[in-house]
Image: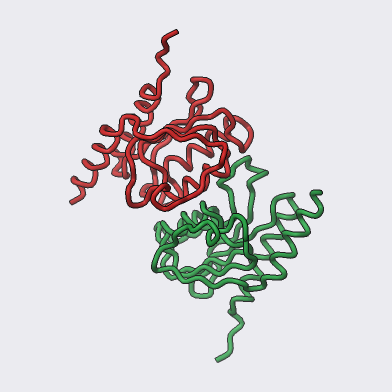
Chain colours: A red, B green
Amino acid sequence: METIFTDDYFMKKALYEAKEAFAKGEVPVGAVVVVNNQVIARTHNLTELLHDVTAHAEMQAITSAANFLGGKYLKDCTLYVTLEPCQMCAGALYWSQITKIVYGAKDERRGYTTLGTQLHPKTQVVSGVLEDECAALIQLFFQNKR
Amino acid sequence: METIFTDDYFMKKALYEAKEAFAKGEVPVGAVVVVNNQVIARTHNLTELLHDVTAHAEMQAITSAANFLGGKYLKDCTLYVTLEPCQMCAGALYWSQITKIVYGAKDERRGYTTLGTQLHPKTQVVSGVLEDECAALIQLFFQNKR
């Protein structure tokens, strides 16, 4: 059976969130958390607005999804995020025991794979979904800053 | 000139917070943030109560201190925390560019030194302050859980 609920489908929702961040002058990273094809959290980076380095899209998504589920472990959940998580977010995802992480663009400098942050052994990772579109939005943001 | 404002003095305040966590059935970790000998944030672990893996003492301390300062960088700040930070908290401290971290007990398994998490090059670290007292509280907590 065909389905509309592909990784591209949900990454587009994360990209929508990233564009919301862009519009607010935030580094444009967006995230959604999905369980059984239902979006239970949608967030974007708010570090500038909140003056808070912990307000990455993923951190808010973890808190928001756990609130929805009423428990701290993100069992059967998939996080879609437009940029590869950093050490902090990967460390939080480790504690959450999330089932799957799907990310778009790589962060060669500060991404968790470069820095060797440990994820939970239960967690699967898929990378490169809508990579070009996710990366282009971030590049545009930093070009405009110069 | 002698001073009462030693590392032990502020770690005792973090220990007080850790005991507050203990009393709530939380893994007993406490933290304070200090700037110019003034405590600007005092927090303890609330992961169980909030059903939120991101609610470590350090994460709340970073957010709380940044709120107090009105900016996201913890310049001239020292974090006192009873247990060595994990990957997530060390990753958040990296982004905060905090000036100094003082911790009590080591976390051999999940501490950031074991897992190789990168701190900001500006950040100094002191470890082992009131180590025995900090470690004993955590051991007591897990003994009671068995």
User: On screen, A117 above or below B136?
Assistant: above
**Closer-to-camera residue (A56/A20):** A56
Q: Which residue corresponds to the image point at 49% horizontal and 74% vertical from the top-left?
A: B36
Residue farthest top in this picture = A1
Instruction: Please tell me in which quadrant of the rendered image residue A127 appears.
Output: top left
x%, y% of residue A50?
Answer: 41, 48
Q: Which residue corresponds to the image point at 65% horizontal and 68% vertical from the top-left?
A: B13
Residue farthest bottom in this picture = B1
Tag count:
0
**Which quarter of the rendered picture does the N terminus of chain A lie within?**
top left
User: On screen, A7 above or below A127?
Assistant: above
User: On screen, B9 above or below A23?
Assistant: below
Q: Is residue A65 left or right of residue A142?
A: right
Q: Is residue A76 left or right of residue A125?
A: right
Q: Is residue B71 left or right of residue A78?
A: left
x%, y% of residue A81?
Answer: 40, 35
Q: Which residue corresponds to the image point at 60% horizontal and 30% vertical from the top-left?
A: A69
Q: Which residue corresponds to the image point at 43% horizontal and 70% vertical from the top-left?
A: B76
x%, y% of residue A44?
Answer: 39, 38
